[in-house]
Image (cartoon, rainbow, N blue to C red):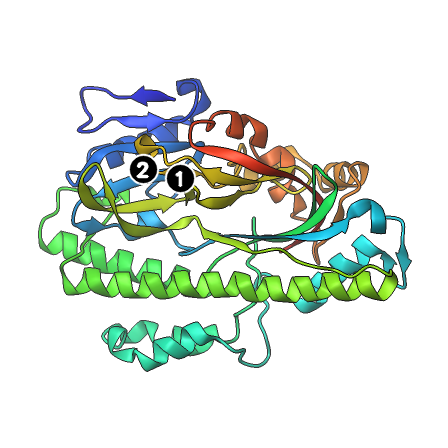
Amino acid sequence: MFVHYNENMKFPVKVWLSGHSDVEESCLEQAEHLANLPFIHKWVCLMPDTHTGKGMPIGGVIATKGVIIPNAVGVDIGCGMNFIDTNIKLEEIKDVQTGNGTVVQAIVGGFMRNIPVNTARHSKPQKSPVLDRAKEEMDKYEKNADLIPLIEDGYFQVGTLGGGNHFVELQVDEEGYLGIMIHSGSRHLGKEICDYFHNVARELNNHYFSQVPEEWRLAFLPVDTAEGKQYINWMQLAMDYAFENRAVMMEAACSVVREVIEKNTSLAVEFGAQVNCHHNYAALENHFGENVWVHRKGANRARVGDLAVIPGAMGSYSYVVEGKGNVDSFCSSSHGAGRAYSRSGAMAAFTTEQVMVDLKKQGVVLGKAKKKDVAEECRFAYKDIDFVMENQKELVTPIRKLKTVGVLKG
């Protein structure tokens, strides 16, 4: 970890990397903007997977006094990970043939048929206790009339996978056991909430002559105002919805795995406990003796004993980790490997053929309807996950290392 600081900054930036050369200049510039906000608590943190984002770096963590910043949470509120392990070893099923190819190919095909992806949605509304509760508590949301239709719309997206870097993966751990990992968030709900309240914050800041420059895209809401309380209500709704969305997808994925394996082998599939965690959110926590709003934008909570999931890229490795409660990071860790190339940069640098050949060499089964943009999410577009893990030894302890076997992508 190194500390970035100069005479033009109010607060320092703590970076869990070896030195400045490991961080994009534009990412550090965004961190400096954060470090000049008057309501920052102690310092700004950058995790080892950090890279430039919208307003605030991805892999950034800040604690604020009395305010909340929509763009420091991000557009996919509640985005996060879910992992579950099984009692089945890859060796037991990898050579078994089904009517739809190998067992792994049949499982990935089952994921594709049972989990809507990208802009796809269910044709009928799905069960959602989270949205049912929101309708019962409509007094918390009714003052933001433009957002109300999102609640009914959300019933059609429960149990659906986002596009981009979101995925459902079948993985194998170092002992040979299969597991399922899911990366997704609050879908359309979270984006609309973020954009709506960012604009509300901009108007409020302009009205009160905020000294935070508009171009920083860090408009804020005092938490004791009506607008701040409204954002917190909607943010929590999106977080609960994202958690539920991952759980519903996991139920569908587990059903596919059980059905395919038990139909084609004599094995009985059992599943462990889910590790379902957010990495885009804000929460009221106590750090260094003060109650502050910790914003984790692409970062896991990693208190002592917290379990979290840190994915690499498809065809790479992922980790289940246990938090160490590092106070300097506000008890946080990275949320993934972090991009080394932008999506357009990856498309320019790597061809579809290169990516497909690489996945084939590794024995990874890819489930993706359109492959022309597959390079956006190839493993070469991301930092080496083991480099990231090496730089956060003081933040988390790895308890399971996993490798991609099959993957559903948007």
Let me know if residue 113 appears in the view. yes
The picture places residue 28, in percent across and down from the top left corner, at: 34, 28
Mark 1 Cα-neighbour bin, 10 Å: few <14, some 14–19, many ≥20: some
User: N-terminal of the two: label 1 or label 2?
Assistant: 1
Q: Is residue 155 above or below residue 325?
A: below
Relative to residue 124, is residue 29 drawn left or right? left
Whole-percent x and y of residue 361? 80, 36
**How far apart, in angstroms, are the residues tagged by discs 1 and 2?**
12 Å
Q: Which residue shows up at 56% across the image and 56% down it?
A: 274
Identify the amino acid type marked 1. Val
Across and down, in percent, residue 243 comes to 47, 61
Q: Which mark is residue 330?
A: 2
Q: In the drawing, what numbered circle is on residue 142?
A: none
Report whether 225 appears left or right of 253. Answer: left
Q: Given the image, on which type of amino acid does mark 2 rest?
A: Phe
**Mark in front: 1 vs 2:** 1
Q: Is residue 7 above or below residue 195?
A: above
Q: Residue at x 75, y 41 (%)?
A: 176
Quarter that holds the C terminus: bottom right
Where residue 314 sits, quadrant-wise, is: top right
Query: Which residue sits at x=75%, y=36%?
Result: 358
Q: Dot 1 corresponds to which residue?
A: 304
Q: Would you say residue 384 is visible in this rendering? A: no
Q: Are marks 1 and 2 in contact (CB under 8 Å)?
A: no
Where does the N terminus fall, quadrant-wise?
top left
Q: Nearer the viewer, residue 195 or 325?
A: 325
